[in-house]
């Protein structure tokens, strides 16, 4: 068992920081920079999947493991962990420092639960629509205006191109479904403060519109191979594939750095001129008359409630979420800041085009979070089980069937 204690010799404690694989080299450097004369921070790597990350941390914390100190948490798991008493709330000046006026409203909301600050926002994430400018031009699609999913799918199909999405049976598929539903003015569940008694609202015109987008893509001929196992990385290569017109793709902010860093390499732009063909726009609309709701994600840093020196560990959490740390993650790994001031820093304005930075910030501010519920893992798993595979999604039945199953799961009448 890993330990986080001062030791028999009275030495300084070592705090274990459980991180996901995103930006791990940068995070290791931040851990070293934030280690002080009072404590050391040691990196522990979590699995790639957000679901598996949650499972590993939940098992440790349910056993009251004192060596689970700092945790990189997907924001959707913060309410569950806080509700279970697994996170040590920040108090007083520490809480004020975590959510000061510099923190964007969206990320600030993700670290609060029942009136307490239970984590520190480290980086925020959102999805935008990436595309080849030449592809959009050939399809006659005006990207200077908001576009709908239907328009994007039709444009790709007309040019024998593809639309890249995340539709494997995992959390990112729920991210897509949730954004489609919110983009039509609906929600998967409402009144989440009621816990298991939350209102299930999947079976709605918004749910039907979301299912309609998925069915249109499946039937269009614009899907990529392996749609039912597609993830964030599987669609990246189609943008610059040989003998291909490219693609439209919804993906997270890291995509820009991925292409910039792979110029001249297999799967990347052939040269700087090819890179210039990369375009970006706000997340597509589900329906024409509703603003889109870009996905909002990122990482919050929680401190395990069973840590021996909680306040010292929270000071470490504040250090690894500092503006300096957020700048490193954004410039090196494409993981966007939760603090407004960092977007205006010289380092970011040199690393990213001005309009792309503005799009990231706007999408994070105006995007749609997944349901904040202590029962989110059940909600997500129930939705996945009915909506997957995407090839089986039917607007006439999938929203209704998934709503009925989710209600039964929350009521304890069905098992996942």
Image (spheres, rainbow, N blue to C red):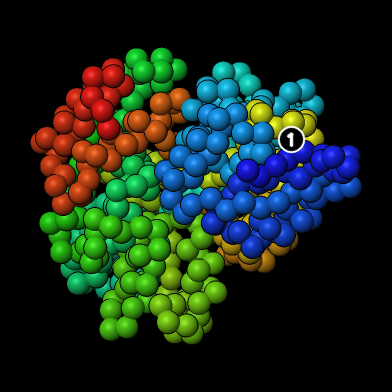
Q: Would you name the residue on which mark 1 appears?
A: 314
Left or right of residue 246, residue 49 in this image? right
Left or right of residue 34, residue 139 in this image? left
Residue at image location 24% in from the left, 59% down from the top: 227
Left or right of residue 1, residue 311 in this image? right
Residue 301 lies, in percent from the top left, at 63, 40
Residue at image location 28% in from the left, 79% down from the top: 244
Closest to the observer, 92 or 88: 88
Residue 334 lies, in percent from the top left, at 57, 60
Residue at image location 70% in from the left, 27% down from the top: 90
Q: Using the rendered view, name the quadrant where residue 14 is placed.
A: top right
Q: Secondary structure at mark 1?
A: helix
Residue 404 lies, in percent from the top left, at 19, 25
Q: Is residue 211 above or below residue 401?
A: below
Q: Using the rendered view, name the quadrant where residue 411 is placed.
A: top left
Total tally of numbered discs in the picture: 1
Q: Is residue 183 above or below residue 168?
A: above
Does the rendering let one see residue 319?
A: no
Q: Quadrant of the N terminus?
A: top right
Residue 197 lies, in percent from the top left, at 34, 15
Does the rendering let one see residue 286?
A: yes
Q: Residue furthest front?
A: 8
Q: Residue furthest left?
A: 396
Q: Residues within 10 Å of mark 1 (few under 14, many from 20)?
A: many
Q: Quadrant of the C terminus?
A: top left
Residue at image location 47% in from the left, 63% down from the top: 255
Closest to the observer, 61 or 199: 61
Q: Is residue 358 above or below residue 130?
A: above
């Amino acid at each position: 068992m890993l330990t986080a204690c001062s030791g028999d010799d009275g030495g300084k404690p070592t705090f274990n920081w459980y991180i996901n694989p995103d930006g791990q080299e940068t995070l290791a450097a931040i851990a070293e920079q934030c280690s002080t004369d009072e404590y050391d921070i040691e990196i522990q790597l979590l699995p790639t999947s957000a679901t598996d990350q949650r499972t590993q941390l939940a098992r440790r914390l349910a056993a009251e493991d004192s060596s689970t100190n700092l945790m990189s948490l997907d924001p959707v798991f913060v309410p569950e962990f806080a509700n279970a008493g697994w996170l040590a709330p920040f108090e007083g000046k520490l809480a004020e420092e975590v959510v000061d006026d510099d923190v964007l409203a969206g990320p600030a909301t993700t670290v609060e639960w029942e009136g307490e600050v239970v984590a520190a926002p480290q980086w925020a994430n959102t999805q935008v629509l990436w595309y080849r400018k030449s592809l959009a031009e050939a399809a006659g699609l005006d990207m200077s205006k908001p576009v709908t999913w239907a328009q994007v799918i039709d444009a790709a199909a007309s040019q024998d191109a593809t639309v890249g999405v995340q539709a494997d049976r995992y959390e990112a598929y729920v991210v897509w479904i949730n954004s489609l539903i919110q983009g039509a003015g609906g929600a998967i569940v409402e009144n989440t403060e009621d816990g298991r008694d939350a209102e299930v609202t999947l079976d709605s015109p918004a749910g039907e519109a979301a299912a309609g987008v998925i069915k249109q893509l499946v039937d269009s001929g614009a899907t990529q191979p392996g749609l039912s196992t597609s993830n964030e990385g599987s669609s990246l290569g189609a943008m610059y594939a040989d003998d291909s017109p490219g693609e439209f793709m919804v993906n997270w902010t890291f995509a820009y750095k991925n292409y910039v860093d792979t110029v001249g390499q297999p799967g990347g732009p052939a040269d700087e001129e090819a890179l210039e063909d990369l375009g970006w726009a706000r997340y597509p609309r589900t329906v024409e008359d509703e603003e889109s709701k870009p996905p909002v994600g990122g990482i919050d840093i929680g401190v395990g409630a069973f840590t021996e020196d909680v306040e010292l560990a929270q000071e470490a959490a504040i250090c690894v979420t500092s503006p300096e740390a957020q700048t490193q993650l954004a410039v090196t790994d494409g993981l966007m800041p939760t603090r407004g001031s960092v977007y205006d820093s010289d380092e970011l304005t040199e690393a990213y085009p001005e309009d792309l930075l503005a799009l990231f910030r706007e999408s994070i501010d105006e995007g749609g979070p997944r349901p904040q519920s202590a029962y989110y893992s059940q909600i997500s798993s129930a939705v996945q089980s009915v909506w997957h595979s995407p090839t089986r999604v039917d607007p006439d039945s999938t929203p209704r069937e998934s709503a009925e199953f989710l209600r039964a799961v929350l009521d304890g009448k069905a098992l996942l």
